[in-house]
């Protein structure tokens, strides 16, 4: 291991894993990077208890034997060697310990928010491809691998990527307004209700066809309704079932905007500053000001102003909470500009979201601030975002300068700083992304391997190669490679590949630059080695919209035709 790994070069990794004097941070990193040393870590009396608990799930007999012979946890730790210091932030940045102690106060102000500043113009070619999780009515696209709970991220893989995380003993985020357990898995809210069914492996049958008019700007599934928007004209169809659908109502909205049409709960939709009752088609003004960017997180709508104050709204139009997000003055746009929903994380009996580097309890606004990774220049920060993982939070800092690599830091759910380091800088490089079941999050290790391009970490496992946010190919567990579906429109992107719950089918997800929801560009049967055929659906031109796990529709704007498909049998 190199000095940058945060592990002393004076001893081998095996010696460090077995040495009771090795700092806890190094032991934690070894547990993440060197699965072949787990038996040594299990025998080390000073291995942190949270690592020991994780090792108890290992199937390695050597680990089990070492744990059985393990001395009591109360044994005193000997004096420790100092670990390698973390790279400092630029002069304008606060120390990580100081940043970590900032807990934003919960405000209860009913004041309506002003419109946020324009969205960040992110450099899409440089954006780290880590499979940002997008929770929508259609799909929760994560980057976590089917059937495997760990990844062998070897030293060679990290060295080949020329970017190794630095283990630190950074302070836990102090217990303040938000307290969450450090252990226990996390899943996307509502993921079990939307996963595509494995029944599609039997094939697809067309079950009905209707004409809903040509040239609609958006087709959105909201609860039991299919919404068709054309300018300011909005039509609703229900029920969407295998035996057809019928028009429920048609209305003229106050104005047409560039903002997306968003489902909110089961009975409401948002269009700009207008709320629509799906049962009746009646409208009412939204509680936020016109032009405000709003995203939906489960049953909560969230708006943020240019000063970094974010307000959560209930379906009844009342304020749930209003908080200020630390550090937002340098990057005031805190919400996605495309209308993507925020990932809602279920962990420890709580619903959590992340805004910039602050974790927020969705129900009461309690917060926990995470220290962004150090390094680079603080005045060059373009954006900071926190990505949920199954075992913690992955905080990414993106820099405006093309010659400065983005950086990432990993935290467990209690806010303990685990490690950090630079990400890949090569714009043209094809980065790996694990192909995982819908409705799951990646582990911290997998996000790191994706961020540094450590393809070796996915050896023997299904993974996609991604270039400039587009899925190019998928390599199957048997080594075969398939090309991702392409589309005739340059603005259309196949941005993710996931599997069905049992792992047989690979679903390719895509969207255009303007759309706020995702669609399916193809379903691949890994057992039969072919794509599922949908009658009268033209590959590269038509896309499929998921209504339910066993119902897909496709819309042709030129003819107005809406066709529905269900699994055969």
Image: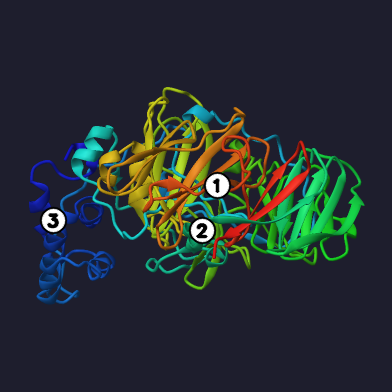
Residue 356 numbered mark, or none: 1
Residue 200 numbered mark, or none: 2
Picture coordinates of residue 530, whole percent (x, y): 42, 46
Q: Is residue 57 left or right of residue 71?
A: right
Picture coordinates of residue 276, whole percent (x, y): 84, 57
Q: Is residue 216 left or right of residue 161?
A: right
Q: Is residue 345 above or below residue 525?
A: below
Mark 1, Cα crowd under 10 Å, few <14 / some 14-19 / many 20+, is many
Residue 286, picture quadrant: bottom right
Residue 17 numbered mark, or none: 3
From the viewer's perspective, is the residue at label 1 or at label 2 nearer?
2
Measuring 41% from the left and 66% from the top, which residue is drawn there?
185
Question: SS of the residue at dot 3?
Answer: helix
Q: Nearer the viewer, residue 78 or 516?
A: 516
Question: SS of the residue at dot 1?
Answer: loop
Residue at mark 1 to residue at mark 2: CA–CA distance: 38 Å
Q: Nearer the viewer, residue 209 or 365?
A: 209
Residue at mark 3 to residue at mark 2: CA–CA distance: 47 Å
Mark closest to the chain's N terminus, 3 or 1:
3
């Amino acid at each position: 291991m190199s000095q940058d790994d945060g592990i002393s070069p004076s001893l081998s990794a095996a010696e460090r894993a077995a040495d009771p004097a090795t700092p806890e941070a190094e032991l934690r990193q070894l547990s993440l990077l060197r699965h072949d040393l787990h038996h040594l870590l299990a025998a080390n009396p000073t291995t942190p208890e949270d690592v020991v608990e994780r090792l108890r799930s290992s199937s390695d007999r050597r680990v089990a034997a070492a744990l059985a012979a393990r001395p009591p946890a109360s044994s005193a730790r000997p004096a420790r060697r100092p670990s390698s210091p973390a790279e400092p932030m630029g002069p304008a940045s606060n120390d990580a310990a100081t940043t970590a102690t900032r807990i934003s106060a919960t405000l209860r102000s009913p004041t309506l928010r002003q419109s946020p500043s324009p969205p960040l113009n992110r450099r899409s070619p440089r954006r780290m491809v880590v499979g940002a999780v997008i929770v929508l009515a259609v799909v929760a696209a994560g980057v976590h691998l089917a059937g495997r709970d760990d990844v062998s991220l070897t030293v060679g893989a990290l060295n080949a990527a020329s970017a190794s995380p630095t283990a630190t003993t950074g302070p836990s985020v102090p217990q303040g307004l938000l307290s969450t357990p450090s252990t226990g898995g996390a899943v996307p809210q509502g993921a079990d209700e939307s996963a595509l069914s494995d029944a599609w492996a039997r094939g697809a049958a067309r079950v009905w066809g209707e004409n809903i008019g040509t040239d609609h700007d958006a087709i959105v599934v909201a609860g039991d309704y299919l919404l068709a928007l054309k300018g300011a004209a909005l039509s609703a169809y229900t029920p969407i079932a295998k035996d057809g659908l019928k028009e429920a109502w048609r209305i003229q909205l106050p104005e047409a905007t560039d903002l997306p049409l968003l489902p909110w709960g089961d009975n409401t939709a948002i269009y700009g500053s207008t709320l629509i009752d799906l049962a009746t088609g009646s409208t009412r003004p939204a509680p936020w000001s016109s032009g405000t960017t709003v995203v939906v997180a489960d049953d909560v709508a969230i708006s943020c102003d240019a000063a970094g104050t974010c307000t959560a709204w209930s379906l009844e139009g009342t304020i749930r909470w209003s908080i200020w997000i630390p550090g937002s003055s340098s990057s005031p746009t805190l919400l996605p500009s495309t209308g993507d929903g925020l990932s809602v994380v279920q962990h420890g009996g709580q619903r959590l979201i992340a805004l910039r580097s602050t974790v927020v309890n969705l129900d009461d606004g309690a917060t926990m601030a995470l220290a962004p990774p150090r390094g680079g220049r603080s005045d060059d920060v373009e954006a900071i975002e926190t990505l949920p993982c199954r075992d913690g939070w992955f905080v990414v800092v993106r820099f405006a300068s093309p010659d400065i690599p983005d950086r990432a830091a990993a935290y467990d759910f209690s806010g303990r700083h685990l490690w950090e380091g630079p990400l890949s800088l090569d714009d043209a490089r094809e980065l790996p992304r694990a192909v995982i079941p819908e409705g799951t999050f990646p582990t911290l290790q997998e996000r790191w391997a994706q961020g540094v391009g450590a393809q070796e970490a996915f050896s023997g496992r299904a993974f996609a190669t991604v270039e400039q946010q587009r899925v190019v190919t998928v390599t199957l567990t048997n080594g075969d490679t398939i090309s991702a579906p392409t589309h005739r429109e340059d603005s259309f992107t196949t941005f993710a590949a996931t599997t069905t719950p049992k792992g047989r089918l690979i679903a390719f997800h895509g969207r255009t630059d303007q759309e706020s929801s995702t669609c399916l560009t193809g379903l691949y049967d890994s057992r039969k080695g072919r794509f599922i055929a949908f009658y009268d659906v033209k590959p590269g031109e038509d896309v499929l919209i998921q209504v339910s796990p066993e119902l897909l529709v496709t819309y042709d704007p030129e003819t107005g035709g809406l066709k529905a498909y269900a699994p055969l049998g």
